[in-house]
Amino acid sequence: MVSTRQTIQISKPQHPSSDAYRAVEREEVLEVAFRDFVQMVLAAGWNEPEVALTLADIADDYVMALAGRVAEK
């Protein structure tokens, strides 16, 4: 397996967490990075349905782990 590491640029937040626009900014930044990531995965040869299902599983696992950490505090 040959791996060529590509980077996805993700900009830092420009608005403080108290600013209502931060949620819009976060969505815009993550949407671009997510789309770029998916395109790289598809270009590597994975098919779109399996990518979508796997990403949903990974996201669900992440949310559950985060909920567990928050509950422990």
Image (cartoon, helix red, strand yellow):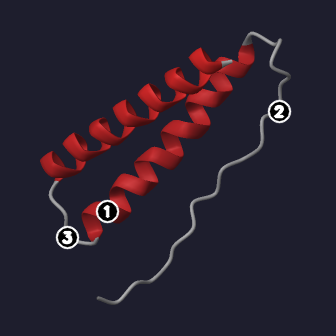
Query: Residue 9 got which mark?
Result: none
Looking at the image, is 50 positioned above or below residue 65? below
| Rendering quarter of residue 34 | top left
The residue wearing badge 1 is 41
Number of residues whose C-alpha sits closer than 10 Å to that of mark 1, classed few (under 14), some (14–19) or many (20 or more): some
Q: Residue at x 83, y 12 (%)?
A: 18
Q: Secondary structure at mark 2?
A: loop
Q: Residue at x 61, y 20 (%)?
A: 72
Q: Residue furthest front?
A: 72
Looking at the image, is 11 positioned above or below residue 57? below
What's the distance in space between the residues labelled 3 and 1, CA to CA?
7 Å
Q: Give residue 62's position: percent from left, percent from top.
A: 45, 35
Q: Give residue 19's position: percent from left, percent from top.
A: 81, 13
Looking at the image, is 32 positioned above or below residue 41? above
Q: Amino acid at mark 3?
A: Gly
Q: Amino acid at mark 2?
A: Gln
The residue wearing badge 2 is 14
Q: Is residue 23 left or right of residue 48?
A: right
Number of residues whose C-alpha sits closer than 10 Å to that of mark 3, classed few (under 14), some (14–19) or many (20 or more): few
Mark 2 vs 1: CB contact within 8 A: no
Q: Residue at x 53, y 28 (%)?
A: 66
Query: Mark 3 or mark 2: which comes first in sequence?
Result: 2
Q: Secondary structure at mark 3?
A: loop
The residue wearing badge 3 is 45
Q: Residue at x 49, y 37 (%)?
A: 31
User: For the C terminus, which image quadrant?
Assistant: top right
Q: Give residue 22's position: percent from left, percent from top.
A: 73, 21
How many numbered marks appear?
3
| Rendering quarter of residue 69 | top right
Q: Is residue 55 left or right of residue 45?
A: right
